[in-house]
Each structure stands twice: as structure tokens, then as C-alpha cells.
Amino acid sequence: MNTVLSLVYLLATGTFIAGLKMLGHPETAKRGNLIAALGMGMAIAGTLLLHTLEVPVFVYALIVTAIVLGGIIGWLIAVKVEMTKMPELVSLFNGFGGASAALIGLVAYGNTATDTSTAIMATIIAGVIIGSTTFSGSFVAWAKLNGSMRSTISLPKYNLINNLVALGILLFGTFLVWTGTDNLLYLYLLALAALVYGVLFVIPIGGADMPVVISLLNSLTGIAAAITGILYDNMVMLVGGILVGSAGLILTFAMCKAMNRSLSNVIFGGFGEAVSSERGAKVAGHIKKTSPSDTAVLMNYADNVIIVPGYGLAVAQAQHVIHEMETLLTDRGVNVRYAIHPVAGRMPGHMNVLLAESNVDYDKLIEMDDINPQFVHADVVLVVGANDVVNPAAHNDPSSPIYGMPILEVENAKHIVVNKRSMKPGYAGIENELFYHQKTAMLFGDAKAALTDLVSELKNM
Amino acid sequence: MIHTLIDFVNDHLQMIYILLLAVFIGLEVIKNIPAVLHTPLMSGANALSGVVIVGAILVMLHADPNNYLALGLGFIAVVLGIVNVVGGFAVTHRMLQMFSKKKI
């Protein structure tokens, strides 16, 4: 490998580490992202231009075409996508990365088939297995998040079946390495089996746990990239891939912690299905309805109002209206704040992004641990499109699947107004006794429509 | 099998050291991140995992120019990899842009 290219790779690796570090601090995050992107650009340009291989012009043309084409597609998706669709998008991109790793393995196998050492075989096969699994797994996660696939699907004995399939793939892979076969068909079969495994792996996991799965799959893509790096003795891929691998794993654990669940619970737990069937009927009682005008009066004469935004707010695109309402109330001397649950929205930090998009003041977004003691002083809590994160069952019902999850303690407030489209249970598929609480009034309707009515009522006062 | 394993370790000792250290850098760098930044961070890390694009380019450069299947698959690998890279960085930037707008 030539020296200039090695230096370029070294520099790029440095930018990855620095970029990732800077991404972790609010002030430097933007610069960190740009620095890492610059490093990536250098690595790509270096790989393409600084090599000692003899390559026909048309292959060059093909590579450049692919880069331009993919670059345009990626850019367009990134610019057009709505912020509410962020988790799906990350999952989709991640799937592409996995597919890329798997394809590299398939092609590299053909390239090196004449002189395959056991070590090279092993890296190729590991790359194909991990890449294919991430690809299909990410697509299932994507489909679950955007609603084209049911959020909970339970297959009979899925733990046993999945583990058997995984074991089978491992044995098959080892067998291929052992025999050093040069039959491509076997490798395609292996890739196919890994694709099936990816689907089986993600399907039983509930929709609410998808962010954890995406983060885990993201980490796996990094490992696939690192393995490909070993194949080509390429440091930038090795270090870059491992960085993402370990960082992704930490992030996965952080998300699990925010939901008070263990990783094995997420993967093997089969959340939702079995437990919710025995519940459901248990919560019953009287529901009190309210109207936008009553809610407006209530909030207008309050001193402290806390808004609990949930994913329902985001899907209804109501983040701008809620900001308008907040400004109106603030102008009238009401102290308005937002209570942000760590997993509000679909991913940790997702709600912050959405509210920042509509210009909500950063200081008004209060994190769970800081806002929880404040609910006692709140006159009105307005819950918009949130459900599981305010479910008291997490505190007082050991049989509930979300028991032990940290929640926003809205039940301590004087009045609670809950905006929901219907009485349908939330993402976790469980009932919420908060809605039947005597302090709670339900404001039914689409979040955007209901909040718009609220705003016009407020303006009339 | 044991022999090839030992040979592999011997030949790649440096790489194994790097791998080990990189794992720890990854773990350390991400420690104590405010929850606010989890989403951009995940998206940024996702963009970084697009570093497979380097491998995709390499595999095409190494491919036999007469092997159209290899070139075709390599082409797809490059397209998918670059979508991950460009899309990932662009969308992360877009998210962070919203945060920094607030600071002014």
C-alpha cells in the first residue's frame, strides 16, 4: 500500500474518533459531524485515486457512476425526510450498509477464490453472515416503525427456532471455512439463510423496542465493516467499524437503561403479546371528557403548566401549534415547560429534535429526573399523544410489562388533560389507568386539530 | 485448524492490538452522552458505519474486469454504501442544525 494512502487513512481514522467524541457534546456536535464527514470523503477519494492496481477505465467509470448515483439518492432522502421519520430512516440507511458489507463478501469471495486461505475465508463468511442479517433485520425494523408491518407478531417457540437457525448458520459457515470450498452456490445459500435469520430475529420484538434493535444492528454493521477491513488489511475500515461497533453497543445499553429493560429481555422477552392478553380488562372506570374551551380556561388561569409531548404529537405534525400555544400562555404569565421522557418519540432524544425543529426554547425542555419533583406544583399537565411514558402501572402494578420503567409522574399534578385520538392502548399495547383517574380529563381528537382549537380559544380570551 | 489460527494471530498481531484498543476508544468516546444527543449520535454513528464503502470500492478495483456478475454486485455495494454515508451525514447535519439555530 502506498505511503500517501496510508497517511490519508490515518488522518481519516483520526477524524472519526474526534468526530464521534465531538458528537457527544451539544456545542461541538455539528462540527464533529462535519469533521467525520470530511474524513470519510478523504478516505473514499484516497481509495479511489491512490492505489497501485491496474484498473480498466470502464471500471473506474462504473465506480464513479455508482458514487454519484448513490450520493444523489442519499442526499435527496436526507433532505426530504420528515423529522418524525428519523428512526425509520436510520434503520433504512443501516440496512443499506449491511447489504453493502454482505455484497462485498460475495464479490471478494469470487475475486480470491483461487488462493483462499482459511483466514480469508473466515472473514468473508463472517462478513456475509453479519451483513445479510443486519440488512434483513433493519428492513423488518423499518417496516415495523413505519407501520407497514404489525408491531407485535408472535411466532410459536420463536426463541428455540431462532437459536436453532443461528446455530445452523454458524455450523454451515464453519463447514465452508473448513472445507475451503470454491463453490459460490454455498455462499449464496449462506447469505440467504442469514437473511432469513435477520427477519426471524427482529419479527418477535415489539415495535416499542425497535430503537434498541436499530442501535444494535447499527453496531453490527460496524463490526461487518471492521471484518471487511481485516480482509483488505485496511485500517480505516477496521478502526472505523470497530468504533461504531463499540459505540453502538454502549448506545444500545443506554437506551435499554432508559426503558429499564435488559438487552436480553428486549431480544428474548417477546414483549407485549403474552402479557397484554391477561391484562386489558383489568383497568376500567369512568372517563371524563373535556372540550378545547374548558381546557383553554383551565390553562389560561394556571400558574404552572407542564406539557408532556409524545409520539402522537409528532405524527400529527403538531409541534408548531404546541409552540404557538406555549408562547401565548407564556405571554400571559403562565410558566410553561415541556417534560421530556428519555424515550419520548421513538428514540432517545427524538422529541428534542422535533421540538427544536419548531423553535421551542431549549431551556424549556426539562428532562425526566429534573421535572418529576415539579409535577406536585403543576396546576395543569397537558399530555399530548403520549401514553406508556405516563402510565402509573409502571410504578404500582408488578404484573404490568412496563413495571419498573421510569415514568413521568404526572398523576401528582392538580389537573391532567390528556389529548388522544381514541382510547386505543399505546405502542406497548397496554391499558393506562391514568386516563380513568379522577383528576384526568380526556380531550379526544387529532393532536393538531385539538391544539389548533385550543389556541384559537386562548386567543379569544 | 489450530495451526491456521495460530498463524493468523501471528500474521495479524498488530491488527489485533489495534482492534482491542479501538474497542476501548469507542466505549470511552461515547460515555456520558446527554439523552438529547442520542438520536443525532446514533445517526452519526450510522453514517460512520458506511465506511464499508471503502471496501466496496476496493472490491470493484480488485474484481476481474470480465466478471460482470462481480462488477454488478460491486456496483450495487458502492451505491448502497454511499447512500448510507451521504444520507447519514446529511441527515445528522440537518438534525444538529435545528439545535444550533436555538443558541443564537
Image (spheres, coloured by chain):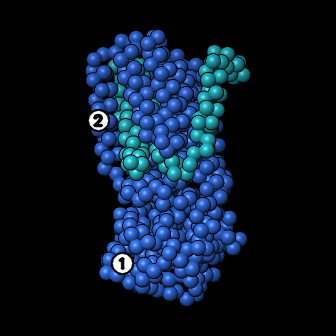
Chain colours: A blue, B cyan
Q: CA distance from mark 1 to mark 2?
A: 50 Å
Residue A301: quadrant of the picture: bottom left
Residue A55 makes an appearance in the image: yes
Residue A171, placed above or below residue A259: above
Mark 1 belongs to chain: A
Residue A408 located left or right of residue A237: right
Q: Earlier in the sequence, mark 1 or mark 2?
A: 2
Q: Which mark is residue A449?
A: none
Q: Quadrant of the C terminus of chain A?
A: bottom left
Q: Which residue is mark 2?
A: A69
Of residues B39 and A430, which is closer to you in this image?
Answer: B39
SS under mark 2: helix
| Same subunit, tags 1 and 2 | yes
| Residue B97, horizontal then vertical, whole percent | 38, 46
Residue A250, placed above or below residue A435: above
Callout 2: 10 Å neighbours few (<14), some, many (20+)?
some
For marks 1 and 2, give the one nearer the viewer.
1
Q: Amino acid at mark 2?
A: Leu
Of residues A33 and A306, which is closer to you in this image?
Answer: A306
Q: Which residue is mark 1?
A: A458
| Residue A389, horizontal then vertical, whole percent | 56, 66
Q: Please report the residue visible at 40 percent of the width from the left and 39 percent of the height from the top.
A: B89
Mark 2 belongs to chain: A
